[in-house]
Amino acid sequence: MHGPTPATLTRTRICPDCDGFATAAITSGVRHDDGSRVLLRVDCRVCHGTGSVPLRPRLTTADLEVAA
């Protein structure tokens, strides 16, 4: 089984809201007829279930001079 790709190699960073755990399974307390639980799968609002977000562009000295 392959491990996750490090964020530094893909020009992305781990989502700051979910820390890379993008989808949570939450039990509703109800059971199916076969006895298994009904689960709600909820994705992170920021990364939409991917676990990573794009890197922001770095500021250069030219950008800082324009801002001043």
Image (tube, rainbow, N blue to C red):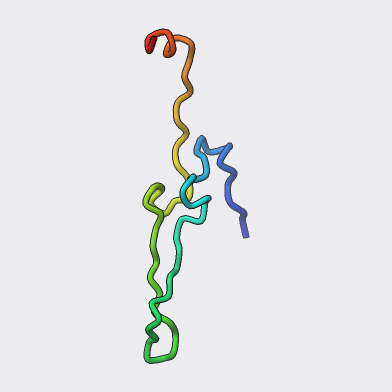
The spot of residue 42 in percent (x, y) is 39, 62
Q: Nearer the viewer, residue 11 or 46?
A: 46
Q: Position of residue 36 (x, y in %)?
A: 44, 85
Residue 11: horizontal and vertical position, in percent?
51, 35
Q: Number of numbered discs present?
A: 0
Residue at x 57%, y 37% (from the top left corner): 9
Residue extending farthest front: 68
User: Residue 8 at x, y = what percent?
Assistant: 58, 37
- Which residue is pictured at 45% across the width and 60% down the height? 23
Q: Quadrant of the N terminus?
A: bottom right
* Residue located 59% across and 44% down the image: 6
Above or below, 38 against 10 in this view is: below
Residue visible at 58% across and 46% down in the picture: 5
Closest to the observer, 47 or 65: 65
Rendered view: 11 above or below 63: below
Which quarter of the rendered picture does the C terminus lie within?
top left
